Image (tube, helix red, strand yellow):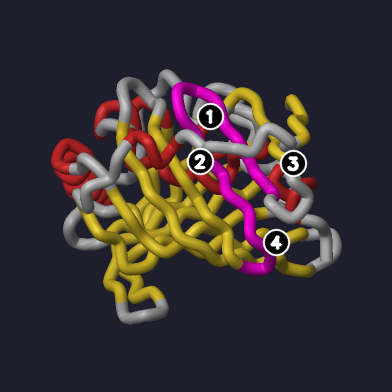
Protein backbone atom coordinates (compact mmCIF):
# COMPACT_ATOMS: atom_id res chain seq x y z
CA UNK A 1 0.00 0.00 0.00
CA UNK A 2 1.24 3.48 -0.77
CA UNK A 3 1.93 5.78 2.15
CA UNK A 4 -0.64 8.40 3.08
CA UNK A 5 1.63 11.43 2.78
CA UNK A 6 2.53 10.85 -0.88
CA UNK A 7 -1.12 10.05 -1.56
CA UNK A 8 -2.19 13.29 -0.01
CA UNK A 9 -0.05 15.03 -2.61
CA UNK A 10 -3.13 14.48 -4.76
CA UNK A 11 -5.34 16.21 -2.16
CA UNK A 12 -6.26 19.80 -3.33
CA UNK A 13 -7.99 19.25 -6.60
CA UNK A 14 -11.39 19.85 -5.06
CA UNK A 15 -10.34 22.93 -3.09
CA UNK A 16 -8.61 24.60 -5.99
CA UNK A 17 -10.79 23.37 -8.85
CA UNK A 18 -13.74 25.01 -10.21
CA UNK A 19 -12.65 28.07 -12.11
CA UNK A 20 -14.13 28.52 -15.56
CA UNK A 21 -15.93 30.98 -17.76
CA UNK A 22 -18.43 29.04 -19.87
CA UNK A 23 -22.01 28.39 -18.83
CA UNK A 24 -23.29 24.92 -18.02
CA UNK A 25 -24.36 23.10 -21.18
CA UNK A 26 -26.94 20.32 -20.95
CA UNK A 27 -29.36 18.76 -23.37
CA UNK A 28 -32.88 20.11 -23.44
CA UNK A 29 -34.35 17.14 -21.60
CA UNK A 30 -31.92 17.34 -18.69
CA UNK A 31 -31.61 21.13 -18.42
CA UNK A 32 -34.55 21.54 -16.07
CA UNK A 33 -33.39 18.69 -13.82
CA UNK A 34 -29.85 20.06 -13.59
CA UNK A 35 -31.19 23.54 -12.82
CA UNK A 36 -33.39 22.11 -10.06
CA UNK A 37 -30.45 20.26 -8.46
CA UNK A 38 -28.22 23.35 -8.59
CA UNK A 39 -31.01 25.43 -7.04
CA UNK A 40 -31.27 22.91 -4.17
CA UNK A 41 -27.52 23.13 -3.64
CA UNK A 42 -27.69 26.94 -3.61
CA UNK A 43 -30.45 26.97 -0.98
CA UNK A 44 -28.44 24.55 1.15
CA UNK A 45 -25.31 26.69 0.78
CA UNK A 46 -27.16 29.81 1.93
CA UNK A 47 -28.50 28.02 5.01
CA UNK A 48 -25.27 26.20 5.91
CA UNK A 49 -23.30 27.82 8.74
CA UNK A 50 -21.38 24.72 9.84
CA UNK A 51 -21.25 20.98 9.33
CA UNK A 52 -20.07 17.88 11.16
CA UNK A 53 -19.97 14.41 9.64
CA UNK A 54 -18.10 11.16 9.42
CA UNK A 55 -15.98 11.01 6.27
CA UNK A 56 -14.56 8.27 4.10
CA UNK A 57 -12.12 8.58 1.21
CA UNK A 58 -11.17 6.06 -1.44
CA UNK A 59 -8.22 6.66 -3.75
CA UNK A 60 -8.00 4.49 -6.86
CA UNK A 61 -4.73 3.94 -8.76
CA UNK A 62 -5.67 3.10 -12.34
CA UNK A 63 -2.24 1.74 -13.27
CA UNK A 64 -1.98 -0.66 -10.33
CA UNK A 65 -5.72 -1.30 -10.05
CA UNK A 66 -5.62 -0.94 -6.27
CA UNK A 67 -7.50 1.21 -3.77
CA UNK A 68 -6.51 2.98 -0.56
CA UNK A 69 -9.29 3.69 1.93
CA UNK A 70 -9.44 6.19 4.79
CA UNK A 71 -12.01 6.88 7.49
CA UNK A 72 -12.41 9.70 9.97
CA UNK A 73 -14.53 12.61 11.13
CA UNK A 74 -14.74 16.18 9.87
CA UNK A 75 -15.90 19.68 10.70
CA UNK A 76 -16.57 22.45 8.21
CA UNK A 77 -17.45 26.15 8.15
CA UNK A 78 -17.99 28.21 4.99
CA UNK A 79 -16.06 31.42 4.44
CA UNK A 80 -15.91 34.24 1.91
CA UNK A 81 -15.25 33.38 -1.70
CA UNK A 82 -14.15 29.80 -2.22
CA UNK A 83 -12.25 29.61 1.04
CA UNK A 84 -13.60 27.48 3.86
CA UNK A 85 -12.54 26.16 7.25
CA UNK A 86 -11.99 22.41 7.27
CA UNK A 87 -10.82 19.89 9.87
CA UNK A 88 -10.48 16.19 9.06
CA UNK A 89 -9.28 13.74 11.70
CA UNK A 90 -8.26 10.55 9.93
CA UNK A 91 -8.64 7.52 12.19
CA UNK A 92 -7.90 4.72 9.71
CA UNK A 93 -5.51 3.47 8.45
CA UNK A 94 -3.50 5.87 10.66
CA UNK A 95 -4.28 8.87 12.84
CA UNK A 96 -3.58 12.22 11.21
CA UNK A 97 -5.21 15.64 11.40
CA UNK A 98 -5.72 17.90 8.40
CA UNK A 99 -6.86 21.49 8.94
CA UNK A 100 -7.47 24.25 6.40
CA UNK A 101 -7.92 27.87 7.50
CA UNK A 102 -7.24 31.27 5.94
CA UNK A 103 -5.94 29.71 2.74
CA UNK A 104 -3.36 27.53 4.53
CA UNK A 105 -3.33 23.85 5.46
CA UNK A 106 -1.61 21.75 8.14
CA UNK A 107 -1.36 17.96 8.01
CA UNK A 108 -0.14 16.60 11.35
CA UNK A 109 1.11 13.08 12.02
CA UNK A 110 1.39 12.61 15.79
CA UNK A 111 3.41 9.39 15.62
CA UNK A 112 6.05 11.05 13.43
CA UNK A 113 5.66 14.37 15.29
CA UNK A 114 5.70 16.06 11.89
CA UNK A 115 3.41 18.64 10.31
CA UNK A 116 3.26 19.37 6.59
CA UNK A 117 2.02 22.90 5.90
CA UNK A 118 1.50 25.33 3.08
CA UNK A 119 -1.11 26.80 0.74
CA UNK A 120 -4.52 25.13 0.71
CA UNK A 121 -4.06 24.88 -3.05
CA UNK A 122 -1.37 22.28 -2.42
CA UNK A 123 -2.34 18.77 -3.43
CA UNK A 124 -1.80 17.66 0.17
CA UNK A 125 -5.16 19.26 1.02
CA UNK A 126 -7.18 17.29 -1.51
CA UNK A 127 -9.49 15.35 0.79
CA UNK A 128 -10.79 18.59 2.19
CA UNK A 129 -11.28 19.91 -1.29
CA UNK A 130 -14.50 18.03 -1.86
CA UNK A 131 -16.09 20.44 0.57
CA UNK A 132 -15.35 23.34 -1.75
CA UNK A 133 -18.46 22.30 -3.68
CA UNK A 134 -20.47 23.15 -0.55
CA UNK A 135 -19.07 26.67 -0.64
CA UNK A 136 -19.79 27.34 -4.32
CA UNK A 137 -22.83 29.31 -5.31
CA UNK A 138 -25.22 28.08 -7.96
CA UNK A 139 -23.92 30.81 -10.26
CA UNK A 140 -20.33 29.65 -9.76
CA UNK A 141 -21.25 26.06 -10.53
CA UNK A 142 -23.12 27.12 -13.65
CA UNK A 143 -20.23 29.27 -14.90
CA UNK A 144 -17.51 26.70 -14.14
CA UNK A 145 -18.82 23.42 -15.53
CA UNK A 146 -20.63 21.61 -18.28
CA UNK A 147 -23.14 19.49 -16.37
CA UNK A 148 -24.88 16.25 -17.22
CA UNK A 149 -27.68 14.62 -15.23
CA UNK A 150 -26.73 11.01 -14.48
CA UNK A 151 -29.92 9.93 -12.71
CA UNK A 152 -31.26 9.26 -9.23
CA UNK A 153 -29.17 6.88 -7.10
CA UNK A 154 -29.44 5.32 -3.65
CA UNK A 155 -26.02 5.23 -2.02
CA UNK A 156 -25.07 2.61 0.53
CA UNK A 157 -26.78 3.35 3.80
CA UNK A 158 -30.04 4.03 1.96
CA UNK A 159 -29.35 7.69 1.10
CA UNK A 160 -31.32 8.89 -1.94
CA UNK A 161 -29.37 11.27 -4.16
CA UNK A 162 -29.34 13.07 -7.50
CA UNK A 163 -26.17 12.37 -9.50
CA UNK A 164 -24.42 14.90 -11.75
CA UNK A 165 -21.32 14.57 -13.91
CA UNK A 166 -19.59 17.96 -14.17
CA UNK A 167 -16.79 18.72 -16.61
CA UNK A 168 -14.65 21.78 -15.80
CA UNK A 169 -13.90 24.47 -18.35
CA UNK A 170 -10.74 26.55 -18.40
CA UNK A 171 -7.78 24.17 -18.23
CA UNK A 172 -8.41 22.26 -15.00
CA UNK A 173 -5.85 19.68 -13.85
CA UNK A 174 -8.39 16.84 -13.89
CA UNK A 175 -10.84 15.40 -16.44
CA UNK A 176 -14.18 15.61 -14.64
CA UNK A 177 -15.97 15.26 -11.33
CA UNK A 178 -19.17 13.59 -10.20
CA UNK A 179 -21.35 14.80 -7.34
CA UNK A 180 -24.24 13.21 -5.47
CA UNK A 181 -26.72 15.57 -3.77
CA UNK A 182 -29.52 14.64 -1.37
CA UNK A 183 -33.08 15.99 -1.43
CA UNK A 184 -32.13 18.94 0.77
CA UNK A 185 -29.29 20.04 -1.50
CA UNK A 186 -26.50 18.67 0.71
CA UNK A 187 -23.47 17.30 -1.06
CA UNK A 188 -23.15 13.68 0.11
CA UNK A 189 -20.48 12.29 -2.19
CA UNK A 190 -18.00 13.59 -4.76
CA UNK A 191 -15.54 11.91 -7.09
CA UNK A 192 -12.73 13.51 -9.07
CA UNK A 193 -11.19 11.65 -12.01
CA UNK A 194 -7.67 12.72 -12.96
CA UNK A 195 -6.33 12.91 -16.49
CA UNK A 196 -4.47 9.61 -15.90
CA UNK A 197 -7.76 8.00 -14.75
CA UNK A 198 -6.75 7.89 -11.08
CA UNK A 199 -9.67 8.96 -8.91
CA UNK A 200 -10.54 10.19 -5.43
CA UNK A 201 -14.00 9.62 -3.96
CA UNK A 202 -15.09 11.30 -0.72
CA UNK A 203 -18.32 10.41 1.10
CA UNK A 204 -19.97 12.23 4.01
CA UNK A 205 -21.97 10.12 6.45
CA UNK A 206 -24.56 11.28 8.98
CA UNK A 207 -24.05 15.00 8.24
CA UNK A 208 -25.13 17.32 11.05
CA UNK A 209 -25.98 20.70 9.60
CA UNK A 210 -25.35 23.85 11.69
CA UNK A 211 -23.91 21.78 14.53
CA UNK A 212 -22.20 24.58 16.46
CA UNK A 213 -18.61 24.52 15.17
CA UNK A 214 -16.01 27.00 16.47
CA UNK A 215 -13.22 28.50 14.35
CA UNK A 216 -10.79 27.44 17.10
CA UNK A 217 -11.17 23.86 15.87
CA UNK A 218 -9.41 24.72 12.62
CA UNK A 219 -6.14 25.90 14.19
CA UNK A 220 -3.99 23.12 15.57
CA UNK A 221 -2.08 23.60 18.82
CA UNK A 222 1.13 21.74 18.04
CA UNK A 223 4.05 20.92 20.39
CA UNK A 224 7.21 23.02 20.16
CA UNK A 225 9.14 19.88 19.25
CA UNK A 226 7.13 19.27 16.06
CA UNK A 227 9.08 18.98 12.81
CA UNK A 228 7.69 21.37 10.19
CA UNK A 229 7.85 20.59 6.49
CA UNK A 230 6.86 23.33 4.04
CA UNK A 231 5.23 22.44 0.73
Q: Is residue 31 visible?
A: no
Up/down of 9 relative to 111, above or below: above
Residue under circle 1?
Answer: 16
Q: Earlier in the sequence, mark 1 or mark 2?
A: 1
Up/down of 150 relative to 168, above or below: below
Up/down of 143 relative to 43, above or below: above
Residue numbers of the magenta segment = 92-109
Residue 125 point in image, percent of width and height: 60, 39
Q: Earlier in the sequence, mark 4 or mark 3?
A: 4
Q: Report helix, strand or loop for mark 2.
A: helix
Q: Residues within 10 Å of mark 2 (few under 14, many from 20)?
A: many
Q: Is residue 205 visible?
A: yes
Residue under circle 4?
Answer: 60
Give the distance between the C-alpha atoms of the residues marked 4 and 3, in whole angstroms.
26 Å
The prevailing secondary structure element of the residues shown in magenta is: strand
Would you say 88 lies left or right of 91 here?
A: left
Residue under circle 3?
Answer: 114
> Mark 2 or mark 3: which is in front?
3
Residue under circle 2?
Answer: 129
Q: Report helix, strand or loop for mark 1.
A: helix
Residue drawn at the location 77% of the way across and 69% of the way down: 66
Residue 12 point in image, percent of width and height: 59, 37
Would you say 215 lies left or right of 92 here?
A: left
Which one is in front, 7 or 19? Answer: 7
Amino acid sequence: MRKFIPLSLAVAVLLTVLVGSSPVNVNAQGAGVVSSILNRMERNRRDLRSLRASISMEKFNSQLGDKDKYDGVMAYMPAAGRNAYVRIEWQKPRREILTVADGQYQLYNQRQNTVWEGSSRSSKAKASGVLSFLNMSGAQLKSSFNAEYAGEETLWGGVNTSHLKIVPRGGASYKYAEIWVDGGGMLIQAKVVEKNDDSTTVRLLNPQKNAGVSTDEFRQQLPDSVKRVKS
